[in-house]
Image (tube, rainbow, N blue to C red):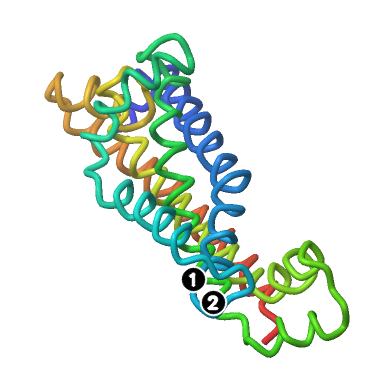
Amino acid sequence: MFESMIKYQAQMWQSIGETFVMVGISVSAALLLGLPLGTLLFFCRKGQLYENKYLSLILNSIVNIVRSFPFLLLVVALIPLTRMIVGTAIGTIAATVPLSIVAIVYYSRLVEQSLLEVPKGTIDAALSMGASKLSLTFKFLYVEARSGLVLGLTTSTISFISFSTVMGVVGGGGVGDFAIRYGYQRFETEVMIYAILVMIVLVQFVQFAGGSLSRLLDKR
């Protein structure tokens, strides 16, 4: 295996870089769009501040449909949209489009669940003190749910790393694509093992970092 590591060192580092790009962009999309979407899902629920059963039904339907779609089929189905957004359906940047869409809806559901764990009394207390809707969200809800939000993002990131391994179908590259091209297709089992070990290390690092930060933020 050591010889394979030396032989394919350049390709592996390139694959790791491609994985970082795909996962990094999808995590950014989850934070920038998934967090607000999850917050909106929470507020539109029955009994919440902005209760709206029609908007809640529409948003929940979209989230549920995308989450239940087999990821590989979703990647293929989104090829026209990907081509329209980035100008091509092949490459690492193109691969980030379906990954980002999945990231947004996946994390939004985890955000909603984290906010539901915030005691109703916290919201009532904030409103009784005259907190604006914006202050309620950022200074009370997000603060109280910060540990769950970080843990949810950690879980999401691990899922995105897993999803990135199949992006070779659109030429997205990444560690998974490296394992297929240099390991499976060339019948080099040690290269497959090498790639798997790299993925395990990446996942364990993310899990450790996210779990540690979540415990640090948990003041309960």
Numbered marks: total = 2
Badge 1: residue crowd in 10 Å (few <14, some 14–19, many ≥20): some
Label 2 secondary element: helix
Q: Residue at x 27, y 35 (%)?
A: 74
Instruction: Determine the residue located farthest toward the right in the rendered image.
Output: 130
Q: Which residue is mark 2?
A: 116
Residue lying at the far top of the rendered structure: 87
Across and down, in percent, residue 119 comes to: 62, 86
Q: Where residue 123 appears, x then y in whole percent?
A: 71, 81
Drawn side of residue 88 relative to residue 78, left or right? right
Residue ID for mark 1: 113
Q: Nearer the viewer, residue 180 or 143?
A: 143
CA gap, disc 1 and disc 2:
5 Å
Which residue lies at the image location 34% right of the left edge and 41% below the top edge?
Answer: 163
Name the residue located 79 percent from the left edge and 81 percent from the top edge. Answer: 126
Q: Are marks 1 and 2 in contact (CB under 8 Å)?
A: yes
Instruction: Indicate whether 208 appears above or below 177.
Output: below
Q: Of the numbered discs in the image, which one, if any, rests on residue 201?
A: none
Q: Position of residue 77 (x, y in %)?
A: 25, 28
SS for tag 1? Answer: helix
Note whether 181 is above or below 158 in the view shown: above
